[in-house]
């Protein structure tokens, strides 16, 4: 299982960040997600596998500066 | 026996501290150190309604202090420091900012810089909405503003430590009388004296660690003006601060909004950017992933070793504990490194506490100069602070020098034998020590990029055209650390900023480049109106902008304009109304800023700047200067030429494509200027129109006179 937004979601072998966002069907254009303590940016969403038992945070990356 | 060690009393006056009313002390403190004159000026309702506070008050004082011919090192140039009506509200996140303004040695026009620490609030609670210091002293002087005992003192400083690091600790102990938390010190160091890119260090006392901590008003050489005037330090002393200290109109509303805001940050910051744990260091790898991390003088946007200076490393290096630069702020992003032992310089081998690094310092003094060792970045950070040097201008200036060295525009005969190739960390540190001592090649680097370009071309025979393209300054100010080549909106965010290319006015890279929220010129212009105005407003009120959009509500994404984070804007509106008693709506915040913003643009005009030609940026900020840069992003650039500009690129070499791309991109930047000037109510030459100044009620005779002199009637 992986945890996101206080909810638990079934983890599957080979699941990428891009897969997760597609499953969530969330219209927000997230630029960054955090898997446990690690920041992953959109250019890497398709190639980044999510480990089982991860905690995921979706970062609304609009700030900076 | 003298009351204070190393200080000889020159003048003391007593005063009666006014009651703070709805966020205002209603008077300014004006000191001329040439003749030790100390006076007070009343703050009228008209001044408050027009300029609000903070930067607005600074600009009004400075405007009246200087003539159009005033240079940065003339006695009549003033250093102005102010909080704002909300400044000093404990537990409301980010309510401790001070804003500093002066005529800059590098831009020769108006400079402003904001900074954390306790000084601004302590100044206000001592009875002064703003401090203006004019004049020059042949002796080192120290100004003591004692709000508790209600006296102002000027001392001659004799043989006090040169470095800010030791100086602030000594003064905090001496003036604190056993209560160091009651003290905030403004000081600089030897680097400010020997360069034009000096910063000011503002302190607060970290009771848990039992040490003095620092934040910097870094930009534009304000520290160099301070040193040139002969000011050693300014010390403010104040007692406990409570929610009632500002005597707000509605303390219950402040409690309510402040509590909601603080709770939201505590809940969401760990899920979002973790500012309270890693500060702004999270940006390093994210910028790198998006090809936006300035690398080797803004040539490239990424480097394989970037993670070595990223959040995962600093997470382990930063000392754990509460790091708020304002009392009770839950963003608490001012992290530091404990027991750091420098490898070089006067503190070599000694344990020191380093305040920082933040993202800007990591990018400027790390990736942008080809250094990916986290501890070298910490050492550069430490010495910049101790010497009183701006880490951004130091980083961007060294990056420029290193590229010039690698391109053969300068050589070892110019650098006095130093190899200044990218990544040469020991020589980067040596250069920093030279800047502080006013020695060797460091004296030239410390003049900043604009002056270096002249020196390199005139004295070393370097190609002036290349220097113009790769010297990352605009208006005389070095760029802060974001790549703008692929974001036209952020090119405007830097190029159209009033004081020069600092990101505090607008940070639109992600909205523009990553999310493509503003595809048209009109949309970019709208963003380059609204965002600079809102960001300006924080500086009028004594507030930090970070809580506004670095932590956002979970339902923000479902709002019509998520980038504006309107729930927070409403909270800030309520906060302003609750302190001042003036009922406002969110749009009123924009109007308040527009007034001050346009006044500052006209102030630039008064000083001989503030026209379209002064909003020019180097081509490195717009597109690839060299073949290698083009080829590093060839797919992107080829696609743009073919699809956006309908160019048949078949058979064309990189040189030709480079020229074509440059032509298109430079045209786009000029079109952006047209759109932004129109949106801001300015002429096509970038000057506010008569209608604009009338609408904003800044049609004072002296403003109209400046406009008239520039052909606007």
Image: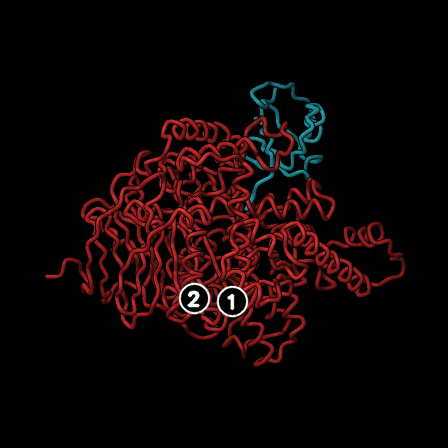
The first of marks 2 and 1 along the sequence is: 2
Label 1 neighbourhood size at 10 Å, few (<14), some (14-19), many (20+)?
Answer: many
* Residue drawn at (45%, 37%) of the image: B277
Spot occupied by residue B159 in the image (x, y as percentages of width and height): 24, 67
Which tint is chain A? Answer: cyan
The residue located at (44%, 34%) in the rendering is B577
> Judging from the image, what secondary structure is the residue with disc 2 in?
loop
Between residue B345 and residue B324, name the one nearer to us: B324
Callout 1: SS? loop
- Horizontal side of residue B137 vs B570, given as left or right: left
Residue B66, which numbered label?
A: 2
Residue B223 found in image quarter: bottom left
Q: Which of B459 and B545 is in front in this view?
A: B545
Chain ID for label 1? B
In this picture, is B316 found above or below B101?
Answer: above
Would residue B342 be visible to someone looking at this image? no
User: In the rendered structure, are the residues bearing label 2 and label 1 in contact, judged by CB atoms less than 8 Å apart?
Assistant: yes
Residue at 18% from the left image edge and 65% from the top image edge: B8
Q: Name the residue under label 1.
A: B607
Shade of chain B as shown in the rendered figure:
red
> Would residue B263 be seen by someone viewing this image from the given angle?
yes
> How far across and how far down the image is residue B652, in percent?
86, 62
> In the figure, is residue B496 to the left or right of B10?
right
Q: In this view, does B110 lie above or below B257?
A: below
Q: Percent from the top left, x then y, of residue B464?
A: 64, 74
Mark 2 to mark 1: distance in Å?
9 Å
Q: Which residue is situated farthest in the left direction here?
A: B1
Asked where in the image residue B192 lies, by quadrant, the reply is bottom left
């Amino acid at each position: 299982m992986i945890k996101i937004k206080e909810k638990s979601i079934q983890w599957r072998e080979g699941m990428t960040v891009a897969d997760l966002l597609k499953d969530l069907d969330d219209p927000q254009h997230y630029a960054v997600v955090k898997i446990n303590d690690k920041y992953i940016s959109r250019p890497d969403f398709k190639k980044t596998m999510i480990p089982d038992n991860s905690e995921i945070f979706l970062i609304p990356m609009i700030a900076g500066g | 026996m003298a009351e204070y060690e190393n200080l000889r009393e020159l003048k003391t006056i007593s005063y009666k501290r006014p009651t703070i009313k709805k966020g205002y002390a209603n008077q300014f403190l004006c000191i001329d150190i040439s003749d030790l004159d100390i006076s007070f000026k009343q703050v009228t309702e008209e001044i408050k309604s027009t300029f609000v506070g903070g930067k607005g008050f600074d600009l009004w004082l400075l405007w009246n202090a200087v003539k159009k011919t005033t240079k940065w090192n003339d006695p009549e140039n003033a250093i102005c420091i102010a909080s704002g009506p909300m400044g000093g509200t404990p537990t409301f996140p980010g309510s401790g900012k001070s804003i500093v303004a002066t005529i800059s040695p590098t831009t020769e026009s108006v400079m402003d810089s904001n900074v954390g620490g306790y000084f601004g609030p302590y100044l206000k609670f001592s009875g002064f909405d703003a401090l203006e210091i004019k004049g020059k002293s042949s002796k080192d002087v120290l100004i003591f503003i004692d709000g508790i005992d209600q006296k102002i003192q000027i001392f001659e400083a004799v043989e006090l430590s040169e470095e800010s690091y030791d100086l602030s600790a000594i003064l905090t102990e001496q003036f604190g009388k056993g209560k160091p938390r009651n003290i905030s010190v403004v000081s600089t160091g030897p680097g400010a004296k020997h360069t034009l890119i000096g910063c000011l260090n503002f302190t607060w006392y970290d009771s848990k660690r039992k040490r003095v901590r620092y934040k910097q008003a870094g930009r534009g050489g304000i520290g160099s003006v301070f040193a040139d005037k002969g000011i050693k330090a300014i010390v403010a002393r104040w007692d406990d601060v409570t929610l009632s200290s500002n005597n707000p109109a509605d303390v219950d509303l402040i409690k309510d909004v402040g509590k909601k805001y603080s709770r939201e940050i505590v809940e969401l910051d760990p899920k979002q950017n973790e500012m309270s744990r890693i500060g702004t260091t999270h940006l390093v790898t994210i910028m790198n992933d998006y090809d936006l991390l300035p690398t080797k003088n803004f040539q490239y946007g990424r480097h394989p070793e970037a993670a070595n200076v990223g959040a995962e490393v600093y997470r382990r290096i930063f000392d754990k504990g509460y790091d708020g630069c304002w009392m009770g702020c839950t963003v608490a992003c001012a992290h530091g490194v404990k027991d750091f032992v420098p490898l070089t310089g006067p503190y070599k081998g000694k344990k020191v506490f380093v305040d920082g690094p933040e993202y800007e310092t990591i990018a400027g003094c790390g990736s942008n100069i080809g250094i990916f060792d986290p501890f070298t970045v910490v050492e550069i950070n430490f010495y910049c602070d101790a010497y009183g040097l701006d880490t951004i201008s130091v980083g961007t200036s060294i990056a420029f020098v290193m590229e010039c060295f690698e391109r053969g525009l300068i050589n070892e005969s110019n650098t006095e034998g130093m190899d200044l190739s990218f990544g040469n960390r020991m020589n980067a540190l040596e250069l920093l020590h030279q800047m502080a001592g006013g020695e060797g090649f460091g004296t030239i680097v410390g003049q900043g990029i604009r002056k270096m370009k002249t020196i390199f071309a005139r004295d070393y025979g370097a190609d002036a055209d290349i220097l113009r393209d790769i010297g990352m300054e605009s208006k005389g100010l070095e760029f802060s650390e974001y790549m703008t080549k692929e974001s036209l909106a952020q090119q405007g965010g830097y190029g159209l900023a009033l004081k020069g290319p600092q990101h505090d006015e607008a940070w639109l890279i992600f909205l523009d480049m990553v999310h493509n929220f503003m595809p048209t010129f009109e949309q970019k212009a709208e963003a380059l109106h609204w965002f600079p105005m809102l960001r300006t407003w924080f500086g009028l009120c004594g507030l930090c902008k970070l809580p506004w959009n670095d932590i956002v509500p979970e339902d923000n994404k479902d709002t019509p304009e998520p980038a504006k984070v309107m729930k927070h804007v409403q909270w800030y509106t309520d906060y302003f109304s609750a302190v001042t008693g003036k009922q406002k709506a969110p749009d009123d915040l924009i109007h308040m800023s527009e007034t001050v913003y346009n006044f500052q643009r006209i102030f630039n005009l008064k000083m001989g700047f503030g026209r379209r030609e002064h909003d020019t940026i180097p081509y490195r900020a717009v597109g690839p200067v060299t073949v290698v840069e083009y080829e590093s992003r060839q797919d992107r650039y080829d696609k743009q030429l073919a699809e956006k500009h309908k160019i048949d690129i078949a058979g064309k070499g990189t040189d030709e494509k480079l020229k074509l791309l440059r032509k298109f991109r430079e045209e786009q930047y000029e079109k952006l200027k047209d759109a932004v000037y129109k949106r801001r109510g300015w002429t096509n030459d970038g000057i506010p129109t008569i209608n604009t100044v009338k609408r904003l009620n800044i049609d004072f005779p002296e403003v109209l006179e400046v406009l008239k002199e520039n052909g606007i009637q």
